[in-house]
Image (tube, helix red, strand yellow):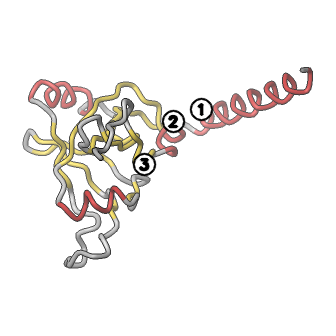
Amino acid sequence: MAKEKKDTDSLIVENRKARFRYQVLETIEAGLVLEGWEVKSLREGGINLSDSYGVLTNGEVFLLNCHISPYAKARLRPGLETRSRKLLLNRKEISGLTGEIREKGRTLVPLKMYWNKNGRAKVLLGVCIGKQAHDKRQDIKKREDDRYLKRVQKGLR
């Protein structure tokens, strides 16, 4: 019996803190250059995007500080968990990102990682600006107000 492909993309991990810490200006999808053990570890959910970021060097984009747990059945050297991983973007996308990131205060942050329809691992990157403390407080207040309104609406029904 053949496996059925899902119509939607399946989420591997989402960087929820990124939306709280940063204001996302633009998003872009990129592929990853991974080794075999990393793909198997991704399938088990052994990844952490919380402190990772993207950087442009020599016309290429790399994902730094992304922690992928070692696959249990693979023989690995220590220290490969947080190696820099090349992101696959075409030349037009890289030149557009170069202009955006060179502006002061902007950074490239991975928002989520998922499997696309063809079974390839993709990462959604955001060009972001760091939020100030008052912006974060406004977000928290808005979220609490929305929760309160939902509770009130449930009680009225």
Residue that carries the numbered disc 1 in the rendered image: 135
* Residue 89 pos. (x, y %): 15, 34
Residue at image coords 43%, 30%: 24
Q: Dots 2 and 1: beta carbons under 8 Å?
A: yes
Q: Secondary structure at mark 2?
A: loop
Please, which residue is most extreme toward the right here? 156
Q: CA distance from mark 2 to mark 1?
A: 6 Å
Q: Quadrant of the C terminus?
A: top right
Q: Residue at x 75, y 34 (%)?
A: 144
Task: Work out how far the residue at label 1 is from the one at label 3, CA to CA, in angstroms.
Answer: 25 Å
Find disc 2 in the rendering and name its residue. 131
Contact, mark 1 vs mark 3 (Cβ under 8 Å): no
Q: Is residue 30 above or below residue 53?
A: above
Q: Disc 3 marks which amino acid? A: Val
Mark 1: few/some/many CA within 10 Å (<14, 14-19, 20+): some
Q: Is residue 117 above or below residue 57?
A: above
Q: Identify residue type, mark 2.
A: Lys
Q: From this view, report whether residue 73 is shown above or below residue 49.
A: below
Give how far apart the Cα atoms at labels 3 and 2 are: 22 Å
Residue 38 vs residue 130: left or right? left
Of residues 62 and 135, the one nearer the viewer is 62
Q: Position of residue 145 (x, y in %)?
A: 77, 28
- The answer to which of marks 1 and 3 sits earlier in the sequence is 3
Question: Closer to the observer: label 1 or label 3?
Answer: 3
Determine the image quadrant of residue 127.
top left
Which numbered tag is attached to residue 86?
none
Residue highlighted by disc 3: 13
Label 3 vs 2, first from the N-terminus: 3
